[in-house]
Image: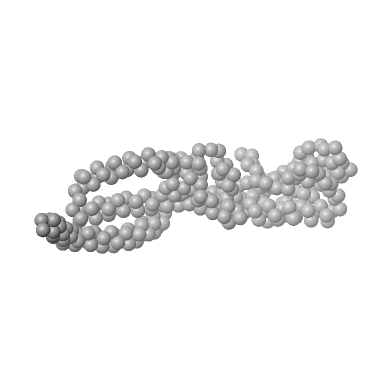
Amino acid sequence: MDNLKNLDRKIEKLYDIGLEFAPKIAAAIIVLVAGLYIINKLVDLIGKAMEHGKISEDVRPFLKSLAGVMMKVMLLFSAAGIVGIETTSFVAVLAAAGFAVGMALQGSLSNFAAGVMILIFKPFRVNDVVDIQGQMGHIKEIEIFNTIVRTFDNKIVIVPNGIAIGDVITNFSTNGYLRIEMSVAMPYEEDFKRVQRIIQEALLNTPKVLQTPAPIVGIDEFESHNIKLAIWPYANTEDYWEVYFEAKQNVFQALADNNVKMAYSEGVELGRIGAGPM
């Protein structure tokens, strides 16, 4: 009988606790759900405000993510207060949990720090053409932990910020224009000056090839059976691929129209991105 009475008392006590905390828990859940919805809307508004305020595209995703995290932490504190958890105790628990999580997520924290360094020192910006860890393409977005690269074949590559600035970065957009490197093999019996003039005219007649710096056509190497010519037209960064294909086509056609015989040479580079003189 005594056991039954004790059980009844415990059930009654749990019932009273449930009656006391159920409304608070329900209110906290409602606040969390509504708060998350409002935070998402606010983050979108912040993004639009930054866009209208002409804040750099490099900074926008970082600030939006940071604002969202901060507001969610504040929302969590508010929900804890509604339930009745003391803020000081909650902060102590969060601090202990944060320390444990921080130890487990050292890589993520280093990526966060690297993201801040990218925004401060700007080794690259959104839309720049870069080569990071062998991934070449346009910078699509700089986030808190990662840098998003869209490659030339339209793949999305996610590079952790720590890796993005922890190694050599080649930024092809810094100077505003690029050198396109092409090579052809000319037989010794051909007149170099004549061939040079034909190629230069073909390059200058190619749309979007820059006049300054002017295209360069020169002797690169004397091989056993032919002469290797270096062909260097220049183009604005955004026009690189268009000029890359048009220039090769026009050079080939001009040589054919002028009956210039070209030799075959192993290892001749048809074209690649070059740094260009300053």
Query: Relative to residue 123, is residue 204 depicted above or below?
Result: below
Q: Can see residue 125?
A: no
Task: Out of 262 and 66, give the one closest to the viewer.
Answer: 66
- Which residue is situated farthest in the right direction here? 189
> Residue 122, how many percent across, how many down?
47, 43
- Which residue is situated farthest in the front direction here? 1
How many numbered badges does the structure rendering display?
Answer: 0
Residue visible at 56% across and 48% down in the picture: 129
Q: Quadrant of the N terminus?
A: bottom left
Q: Is residue 271 left or right of residue 82?
A: right
Residue visible at 37% across and 59% down in the picture: 44
The answer to which image quadrant residue 265 occupies is top right
Q: Is residue 67 left or right of residue 258?
A: left
> Residue 146, how many percent across, how many down?
46, 47
Residue visible at 36% across and 43% down in the picture: 101
Residue visible at 16% across and 59% down in the picture: 11
The answer to which image quadrant residue 225 occupies is top right
Task: Out of 10 and 92, give the one closest to the viewer.
Answer: 10
Q: Can see residue 235?
A: yes
> Residue 229, how many percent across, how many down?
78, 42
> Residue 155, how many percent across, how many down?
57, 55
Specify how the rendered protein is coloured.
one colour
Q: Quadrant of the C terminus?
A: top right
Task: Out of 152 and 128, give the one closest to the viewer.
Answer: 152
